[in-house]
Image (cartoon, rainbow, N blue to C red):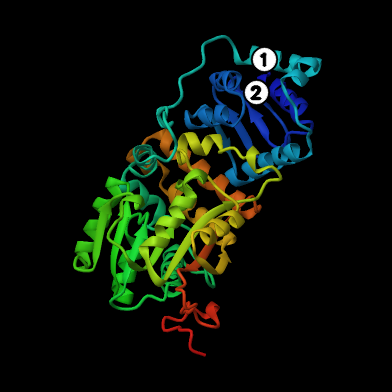
Amino acid sequence: MADAASRLVALAEELLGNQLPVRVRAWDRSEAGPPGAPVVVIRHRRALRRLVFRPGELGLARAWVAGEIDVEGDLYEALDLLAGMIWEKEESAPSFGLLDFLRNADLRSAAAEFAKLAGPGLPPPPPREEARRRTGLRHTLSRDRKAISHHYDVGNEFYELVLGPSMVYSCAYWQDGGTLEKAQHDKLDLICRKLALRPGQRLLDVGCGWGGLVLHAAREYGVTAVAVTLSEEQAVYARKKVAEEGLAEQVEIRVQDYREVKDGPFDAIASVGMAEHVGAARYREYAADLHALLVPGGRLLNHQIARRPLEDESAYEIDEFIDAYVFPDGELAPVGRTVGLLEDAGFEVRDLESIREHYALTLRAWVRNLEADFARGVRLTSPGRARVWRLYMAASALSFERNRIGVNQILAVRTPESGASGMPLRSREWRADASATP
């Protein structure tokens, strides 16, 4: 097994059809690849066995989570180099099936060499952080509760480490630099201004997280609020913050699915970073439910990650790593489809603001928080969970920067039959006292 690194680099370059942009250090301490580049460390042959039995992203993810693969040097640079090469390969390569592989002697030989490097043995079990096997239809009430629990019920102290004191887990709004805390404050205030919140109004926060938005809206805008989450740990944390701030008369935190909210109507609804969990099959129902919960003239602020549209939308596949380790059953849709479904439900879409670059900055801030005290992050969760978060946040930051995905704030109104939307003529000012009066 001498010089495993050189053999791995040669195999990778043969399969990808280009020079590998990173160095490789193998379990036998051999190294190969361009000098000075980030180093991908393969600590154990078991990582290769994972790829033999589960080729592709999920096999690589399992090896990363298990600590069998690591990166020395700049993680962003390594991911950017590798992702750029893979994306370029995907976009330029024709479709390739099993018969093509069987007819290609060079690829068959490369696969046999890779299997030899991997060594004998059964497929290693997935790391325990992987979502448990799921059965039944997606996005039922019970399955959604399990999916949300997998992601959010990993310890509030861990989220405090990553998110910082704001405990706001969605894209911040960066204006003229400043800290993560200021950017999150500015995002919460922007949402309140877009919703034109006023004292005495009733706000519903769908997927409220740790309560940051309803606390801000009650404290700064005088509303009463109902906030729903499927995470028990989030609810415990949010209720404690509500009590500490003396807002118990204004804010109610519920462990409840949005489909179970029956005590409308509300003057405004915010859905921030939640709709990605809804799923394509349920989105029309989601939009109709929120429309029915609003008073005529009420506003919805839908803050949602979007993917780029595909030529063949039926070819969309959920990202294997994200589905197994981060957001089970999460789905992304193009922003155009989201707008169309909101309109189908009866909403009038009045404003759409893309804040894609803001999410890249937010994710990089979260990665810095985690890396600054990674050992504590491991203690608060597990080595695998901390590695999941570091990889997913860094890779997501690059995806936003490269315009692979985006994030949009869509402001929609349940416009009454009279047509009086209540929207200001110059909506981009988003003044707290904005009205439709010229």
Query: In terms of secondary structure, where does tag 1 sit?
Result: loop
The image quarter in which residue 337 lies: bottom right
The image quarter in which residue 272 lies: bottom left
Q: Is residue 177 left or right of residue 162?
A: right
Compared with residue 118, is residue 37 higher up or lower down, i.e. above or below? Answer: below
Name the amino acid, label 1: Ala
Compared with residue 298, is residue 153 higher up or lower down, i.e. above or below? Answer: above
Q: Residue at x 70, y 13 (%)?
A: 112
- The x and y percentages for residue 34 are 73, 35
Q: Which mark is residue 30?
A: 2
- The x and y percentages for residue 201 are 31, 74
Q: Is residue 304 left or right of residue 192?
A: right
Q: Residue at x 43, y 31 (%)?
A: 130
Q: Nearer the viewer, residue 391 or 432?
A: 432
Instruction: Determine the CA span between mark 2 and mark 1.
Output: 8 Å
Compared with residue 138, is residue 116 higher up or lower down, i.e. above or below? Answer: above
Question: Label 1 belongs to which residue?
Answer: 2
Which badge, 2 or 1, comes first in the chain's sequence? 1
Q: Are marks 2 and 1 in contact (CB under 8 Å)?
A: yes
- The x and y percentages for residue 133 are 42, 27
Q: Residue at x 55, y 82 (%)?
A: 426
Q: Nearer the viewer, residue 160 or 313?
A: 313
Q: Nearer the viewer, residue 303 or 314?
A: 314
* Numbered-mark total: 2
- Of all residues shown, which one is farthest toward the bottom? 438
- In which quadrant of the rendered image does the N terminus lie? top right
The image quarter in which residue 416 lies: bottom left
- The x and y percentages for residue 395 are 57, 45
Residue 435 appears in the picture as rendered: yes
